[in-house]
Amino acid sequence: MSSVLSGIFEPGLFTSEPVRVAVVVGGAVALVSAVVGVFTVIRGQSFAGHSLGDLGTTGGSGAFLVGANPLWGFVTFAIIGAGAMELFGSRRPRGRDMATGIVLGAGLGIAALFLYLGTTQDNTTGATITILFGSMFVIRASMIPVFALLSVLALAIVALLYRPLLLSAVSQDVAAARGVPVRTVGLLYLLAMALAVSLSCVTIGAILSTAVLIGPAAAALRLTKRPGLAIAWAAVIGLGVTWLGILLAYDSYYWPPAGRGWPVSFFVVALILVVYLLADFASRYRARRAGARALAARRGRAGVAGLQPSETPVPGAG
Amino acid sequence: MFSGIMVNAWIVATMVAVVAGVVGFFTVLRGSAFVAHAVPQAGFAGAAGASLIGASTLTGLGTFAVMSALSIGLLGKRGRHDAVTALALVFMLGLGALFLSWSDQYASEIYALLFGEVLGVANNQVLATAVLGVVCILAVVTLYRPLLLSSVMPEVAEARGVSTQQMELCFLVVVALVTTMSVPVVGALLMFSLMIGAPGTARSFTDKPLAALSLSVGFAVTIVWIAIAASYETDWPVGFFVGVLGAVFFVAGRGWVAWQRSGALRRNNGGRPATGPVHLATASGTSVEPT
Amino acid sequence: MTEPPRSGAPREEILSLDGVSLWLSGREILHDVGFRLHAGELTGLIGSNGAGKTTIFKVILGLESPSSGKVLFGGLARPRRNRSIGYVPQSIGLDPDVPLRARDLVSLGLDGDRFGIPLPSRGRRQLVDEMLDAVDARGFADTRVGKLSGGELQRALIAHALIAKPRLLLLDEPLANLDIRSEQEVVGLLATIARQQQIAVLISAHEMNPLLPVMDRVVYVAAGRAASGSTEEVVREDVLSALYGQHVDVLRVHGRILVVAGKDEAHHAEGASGYTVVPRGLG
């Protein structure tokens, strides 16, 4: 038994400092992303989340170039991006997606340049990987307070805006009629999203951050329609995949083929996809069972009343 | 810059630009910009896997690109906006990173596949690239009319016997082939800028379809030539120039349109007279709802 | 007013539906639908949304196969690639920036289903110009399609459908989004086309009044069933009541026709009075 356990929890897992930091920071970031992500999906702003991640790429590589901590680059550019989105309106007329994509392309090109200049000047090559695909195991313990602060800030914004967010997700006009300052709410929410995305840029990487933002949230929303419950589910899923990902990444250190360990962000992204597929399957199975039950009930009632539904010509029913 | 190994680089780059410009024209026409993000990302994973097992990058790229293109075709329009698609694509990127993490060239390979490389196509692959290019061009020339019809008016096309389903699948396969050719040169993340930026710019300058197609090719070739030359001179990544130039051209096109429109207003030359005001219900009993 | 057919000359039959029924997902969408269309005639396919008009169109176009019954085109079964039917959809979802002019749209109608690239030739251009003139679209021929108004786009689509010289022209709710003046123009245009080019025109609408001045025949559809004939023959209380399966009244007011739902027979017997005006859609 103990050999099975030590097979799963490889020796040194709980004493390793990088793992401990990863568990704390990764966990916090997963929590924040999941909670913010639920509203992102409900409000249909997944594309905005993806765009913020792309902007993060530019920011992080820029920070790297000037020798600053990439986190500040992520945060700065994400917040600027959020502001720009609010300025240009979050409506999505046709062609807006195309224009945004092209402009973001410039951002990615600039990121490529920053990374190139930074790595040649430092003579290091790891920055590309770290910024694009995350660096959960190389976060310094001294950064924990910063992460904690930003996480709390993002969660506080969501907690404050909980009801207005839900109302304006249903209908902007209804919310405005009820006196909700829709524009301010939108802007503050984009800010929370910018914070969440930049945090996950550090742990999972800028181009993979979308997965932790919308993955757990989308899976949770397949399981339940109630926002409060969805947030709880999303948090559980987000924490679960992150911690499991850390575990697997640590265990994979001696796995073939390279003996270097598999990237933790790969595990996280793969697990999110698997969990989403399971949640989707479960919800469809449940829907089919419910549908069959309802059909049987209707047939039962119709049999009693003696009506055949398809024979009555009702105008407009064809 | 124009001798030795660079000759092949120029030939490949030009072919890539021409085909990307042509296929991009239809991609934008069909409102399928999404595939210009999706297929390269899947291709990235394939290329990473191929480089790991020592196979040719083009093979890996091509296999994954075609498979993902067909999957998108089978999912249909609904699949585009589904969370599964987004998560699957991110997974592809993660998978590519995984494959490359097993190789010795982790960082440099990732960089080259994502952001492009002047000598991205090895000499022994120039012929393969050329073949892909010719196949793409032939396909587009043959399918031009039915593809155009089914892109603009799918219902009417179906009524005329054009199968929109078949057109969609053919089109997606062509996109996969273009991706295979282009990703080694411009990078998986920047392919969007070339394939969408060029036609997006072209449509700002002309109303005619064939002219827009030609302009799209022209802009693509210009972007790629500048990118290759500048990258050769400065050693800066090709993707940087493609991304920035794509955006610059696109914005310039939009600016041109805005300038024209404001000029037209200033000259009080608003064009054709507007349609009359909407008439509400009249005494004769016809009830017409406003548009 | 419509021209009466030349006395003694029978009009060529273009399309006939006989006993067409269609089942989809376990529901009967069409039940025993039958009518004939003749050259030079303008026929209105009238019915509310969901009555089955679009399905009938799909059957005629070959996009749906009837579960039973026959669709004959000039006496023969309908081939898949049929250039003799022109189709004008209700709308085409278009990106306003699409680089296609009105004349390109029309030109596509000539051979948009054939492979290859259209080679510009003087003959082609002339044909396109003629079509544009026929629908009075020369003024905006070189304007980008996305910038056309609803009525202009419609005329371009009509020209697109006509350029292949079809024998049958189908229009799906062409009047739905037009103001009164455009409505009258389009109706007049279609009547002229039917007469001059001797083609059969079938217009679907949920409101028959705008078509009354030019409609030769009507096919009235309700709940998947249809009644066809002249306006006098079909738009009558007994015919429509049978179609709807409940009592309807047909009122003629100032040259307009109003079809109004009455109470059930059962309620009549109880002495209930009063009528409910049917919400828009029953014509």
Image (spheres, helix red, strand yellow):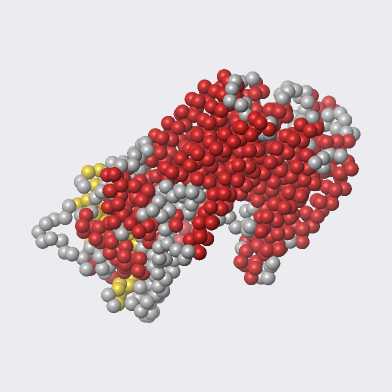
Question: Can residue B89 be seen?
Answer: no
Q: Position of residue A226 (x, y in %)?
A: 67, 56
Q: Is residue B246 above or below residue A190?
A: above
Please tell me which residue is depicted at 57% across the width and 35% down the height of the picture: B224
Left or right: residue B184 versus residue A257 is left
Please tell me which residue is depicted at 36% across the width and 79% down the height of the picture: B283
Q: Nearer the viewer, residue B218 or C42?
A: B218
Q: In which quadrant will I find the C terminus of chain B?
A: bottom left
Left or right: residue A141 versus residue B288 is right
Q: Quadrant of residue A128?
A: top right
Please tell me which residue is depicted at 37% across the width and 57% down the height of the picture: C140
Left or right: residue B128 versus residue A146 is left
Count how many numbered circles sit on residues in the image: 0
Q: In which quadrant will I find the N terminus of chain B?
A: top right
Please tell me which residue is depicted at 38% across the width and 72% down the height of the picture: B287
Left or right: residue A287 versus residue A205 is left
Q: Position of residue A8 (x, y in %)?
A: 80, 30
Q: Quadrant of residue C10?
A: bottom left
Q: Position of residue C70 (x, y in %)?
A: 26, 47
Question: Can residue B36 be seen?
Answer: yes
Q: Position of residue B119 (x, y in %)?
A: 62, 26
Q: Nearer the viewer, residue A70 or A46?
A: A70
